[in-house]
Every structure is written in C-alpha cells, then in structure tokens.
Image (cartoon, rainbow, N blue to C red):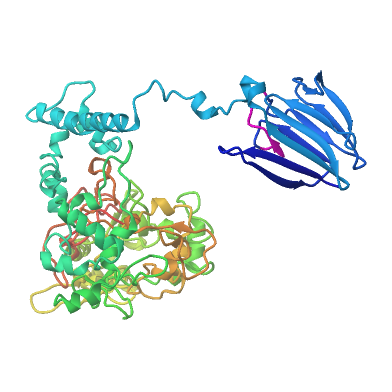
Amino acid sequence: MSFILRRISTTKTGKQIVRDQALPGDMITLGRDAGNIIHVADLAVNPHHATIRSADGRHVRVAALEGLGFDINGRAVDTADIDSGAGAELRFGGHRMTIAREAEQIILLVERIDELSQSSKDVDEVKAFSLQRVMPGKRVGAWTFAVLMLLAFLVGPIWAWSSYRNVDERPEGFHADSSWTSGPLSSAHANLKDDCQSCHVEPFVAVTDTACVSCHTGEHKAMSAAHANAPTAMLLAARAPAGGFDKLLAGVGAAFNRPQGRCVECHTEHEGAGPMAATPQKFCADCHDGMQGRLKGAGHPTMLADAADFGTGHPEFRPLVRAAPGAKPMRAAPGKPLVDYDGLKFPHDLHLQAAGGVARMAASFRGRYDFGQKLDCENCHRPDADGVRIKPVDMERDCAMCHSLAFESVGGVTRTLRHGEPDQVVADLTAFYRSTPPTRPLQLGGMQRRRPGQYAEGQVYNVYFREVAVRPSRAQDAVRAVFSKGGACYDCHSISAPQAGNSWRVAAVTQTPRFLEKGWFDHDAHRETDCADCHTTATGSKQSADLLVPGLRQCRDCHVGESGARIVKVETATESPCAMCHEYHSDGGKPWLPQRQRRKNVATITDRPRQGAYGVSMVTGAGPSRLYRVTWRTPTLRLTGKGG
C-alpha cells in the first residue's frame, strides 16, 4: 500500500499541470520544514504540522502535531479519521488537500488556494526577513568596503610610517602601521616593538642584511668560514635549484626585492612572543642535500659530505685527532681508523675491570673517595661547572690517590715529587741524597766510649761511613729509577733519556677539550644515560690512543630525523633537526640560544707554543706547592669556543 501525492499547478496562461509522486510507507509528514515528505511553503503552516497514516490501505487518520490544527469540510479539528473511498477536503493555511481513492491507492491532492488566505501568498521568506530594502546595493557596498580597506591598511600605515620615520622611539598607543604586523616580536627583539624603523628602514622594501648587521656585528663576524667567507657564486651554486611552485615563489620574491640568502630566511620574526623559533631543517637541507655534486660541477670542489636528515642522510663524524705522536690536531679522514695520540699510556680496560688489583684498590678507598666496588668512568672524568663538557684529567685530583709520588716523610709531613716538572724531580732527588745521610745504625748510637777495635770487628763503622761517602752518587740511581721502566713516571708517560746538553724529557700530554668542533654536544642533557651506553669501546681499550668518542651509530640509537625518519629501530626516539647540534654562526655557543644566555667556558688553556716533546714544567703553571697539588693545563690549542 502506498500514498500518491498529486500536485496541480497553474501556468500564467491558465493551463493546469498535474504531477503524481508515489509516497512509500504507512505514515506521511506534512509541514513548512523542508524535511517533511509533503513540504508546504506557507507561513500559516507549522514546520511540523501534521501526520497522515493508514493502517489498512483504506482508512486515513490525520493528526495535528503542534496544536495549530486544520480544517476538514469547513470544521477546525486536531484529529480526523477519513474513509478514502468517501473522500474529504482538508485545509492547511492557504493550501487545500483532497483525500480520495483511486485504483486501490489513496490519492492526496495538494493545491494552493490564493484567494482564500492572505498567508498563502507566494512570499519569499529570505526577502521578507532581510535588510536588503534598507541597505545600499551590492555595488555601492563593495566600493565602500574597498575604499575603507585602502584607507585602513594602506594609506593609514604609510602615513603612520612617514610620521615617525625620524623618531627613535614611538610613543605608546595605537599606530596604523601595526596592522601590517603578522604577530608579536620574539623576546630577543621585544624591545624594538616601538622602533619599527630599526629593521624596516624603507617602506615596501624587505628587511635587508644591512639592517641586521647594524646590531648583530659579533654574530656576523663569527659566521663560519664555510658561509661568510665563501664566494657568492659558491653559495648560490650550493643551493638546490628551485622547481615547480618554489621557482614561482623565487620569481615573485625577486620581483618584489626579496632576494634569496637573507638573514630573515632562517631567522623569522613576528611569529609570536617568546624565544625565536629554531631554524627548520629545510633551510639547511636546501643546500647540504646533494651539495657536494653541485659544487663540484660549478668548479667549487669541497670536502663537505652531503647531509639531509640525521636519521637517514648524515655523514659519519670527523672528530679532531692527532694521527701521530706530536702531530697537530686535524679532523679525522673519512673511512680511516680513529686514533688519537695524546702522549699518555693509559689502558681503560685495566682500570674498568670488575676484579683485579685496580678494583681492589678502589674498593679499599671507599669512604675516603667516591668509589664503589670498582672504578667507574665518573671517578676520573668529571663534568665542568655547567655540565656541558668534561674537565681535563688532573693528576692530583684523579690519579694521585693510587699513583703516589711520595718519597719522604719528615715529622709527619709527606714530601712528593713535582708532577709535571721533570727538572725539578731531578733537583729534588739530588738534593735529598746530598743533604741527608743514610740511616745511622743502632750500633753507632749511645754516648758510652768504646774501643776502636770493636768498630772494626763488627764492620758497622766501615759500612756506614762508606755509604756516607757514596751517598751523593745514589741520587743518579734514584733519578734513573723514577724515569725508567717500572718507575713512577714511566708507567704513564713517554720518556726520553738524557742526551747531550739535555736532561730527562717527558712527552707533552695533550687533552683535546672538544673533539667535535662542528657540532654541539651537552653531557648534562645526557646525564641519565650511562657512559658505557655511548662510549661502547671503553671497556676493551688497551691504549690511550684508542679514540672513544661515540660515532654516528651510537647517536642514532636514540636520535632520529626532524620528522621522525630513521633507518634503524629506535625504542625511545628523539626528533633531532639540524639546529639541535649545528649552528650557522660558529661562535661556539649552544645552537639558537641568545648570546647573553650562553654559558662561558672557564677552562684555563695555555697560549704557549706547542712542541713535540718538552719538560712538563712548560705545561703546568707556577703555584703553591702542597701535597699532590698540581694544576694541569691543556697545551696550546686554538679553540673556536664552547661546545660539546
């Protein structure tokens, strides 16, 4: 069973058009709302006016829903039961519905009756409730709006800029050209919020590098040689050629005086209050991804390897090393074994053993020193004040508790050999043997008189005074023992025997303060990580020439690319853009930190010229002589600044 909706409309010529539509189901809804099955566009009809049901396919029940009711055969009712065979006429506002039966189907004939109801007139609801009649036309409104926009966002800002062009600082209040600002200044430039002309020198001209350098003179001078001192042609050749939409943007930028390579391409402003955002990785990868091939093709060959993403495309680290004893520190060659001759003899494996003599000695010192059952890395390698780097190993602080240099005790005071001063060691031992007699035998003690024969008979007298006679020559034996195999100096240092005009010489000890000069590393940020997790070869190192600096593989155990890209499985991934470790301005500070927030390195570095081998007195500075008091200074190294 189904209802048939029949609509009759009349054309202007009086012709009637009849349209039938089958309405499936046993219930039909009627109302002004467009969601009803029978939609009646009449203000006199409620949005959901009535329902029409038929249970047996013949009898129809019409019920009003919202209390307005309807008329049936001239009577106002809320509910009506109608026999479709007999038919009925219902009125809803200005519309008439006739219910009839035709060929076992219920016919619902709906037609408009304009002459019967004022509310049934064909009224456009949108026009009836709009303000169109009292408002200006669209064209007038559009031109008015365009003029207002020009005044507010073009004429006003230009007038404000010209009014304060020669003023150092604007007064407080609203300024029309602030509408051009895309956002607040960063905290580094917040003090310039009332001095727009310091950066925006000319109207309609993009911020130039000259405006930046007028304040940031130090950063500009500290730019790395790979950038600041490179020829312009080389910098342009390094950049990957723009393609597609980027090429279009580059052309538009050139047309509006926005050349490429400006400071503001990396250091974007008006991005919101707070610290300036770190430079996105894209700004680095635009040049460094595939750069080696482009520079070679342009006639500017380079040793720099290509880099695009730390997780997937980064070259192996090239730390500073001394490839031979006495050599100058140079960046390690790619693909070659990493060795660094620092002048020491030190087996890490022996000192890190869980059992053995070193471990037993460390355990015996518990309570006096911060030792455990064995030696750990932090017992000798201590972080500096800010935790970024590791202090140079100091003999007195880190070694002397086990490797004692004591040679005499006088009245409870222990005398020690001067560490770092071999000439003084020779002088101290010589003076000791010259100025002090051998221990006097007990047989020669007392004040009673004895016959000379008794001395000779026991040979005590002869032996003692013969030792007194040769006592000064014993100094040479003691000096030779100290600097020879098994002696206090030989076990840790490279010793050169005396030659014509020279005394004993000790090879220079050089401790590199920063191995990775091109990248930043902060030990304090990794304090929750065990040393052995990164320095994986320390427990097996048998000589100090083994370079224990972690490689790329160890870092990738935790660090992935900026977007999380990786080529190895990482349990706890740390997204690492280029700016996390590298900086364009190589002033040695932590990347993207303001200069005033950067922590200064207070390590003392000597400025004396390096030598291949020299007395350690040239390395240490003069200072008060106390037990195990030696101030170690790193030999001459030109540092680029502070970093990991």
The number of discs equals 0
| Residue 412 in the image: above or below residue 118 | below
> Image quadrant of residue 161?
top left
Residue 495 visible in this rendered orientation of the protein? no
With 549 as the anchor, is 120 left or right in this view?
right
- The residue sitting at the bottom extreme is 336
**Which residue is more in the foreground, 87 or 460?**
87
Q: Is residue 642 visible?
A: yes
Predominant SS along the magenta part: loop
* Residue 375 at x, y percent in the picture: 47, 61
- Please state, as top left, top right, bottom left or bottom right, where the C terminus lies in the image: bottom left
Q: What segment carries the magenta color?
A: 35-44
Residue at 73% x, 29% y: name it. Answer: 96
In the rendered structure, the answer to whether residue 174 lies left or right of residue 545 reads left
Closer to the camera in the image, 245 or 228: 245
At horizontal 27% and vertical 41% (from top left) the residue drawn is 597
Residue 183 drawn at (x, y percent): 30, 36
Please tell me whether residue 38 belongs to the stretch shown in magenta.
yes
Q: Look at the picture and state if 322 lies above or below 134.
A: below
Looking at the picture, tell me which residue is in the foreground, 524 or 564. 564
Q: Is residue 552 left or right of residue 468?
A: right
Q: Which residue occupies the foreground of this view, 518 or 418? A: 518
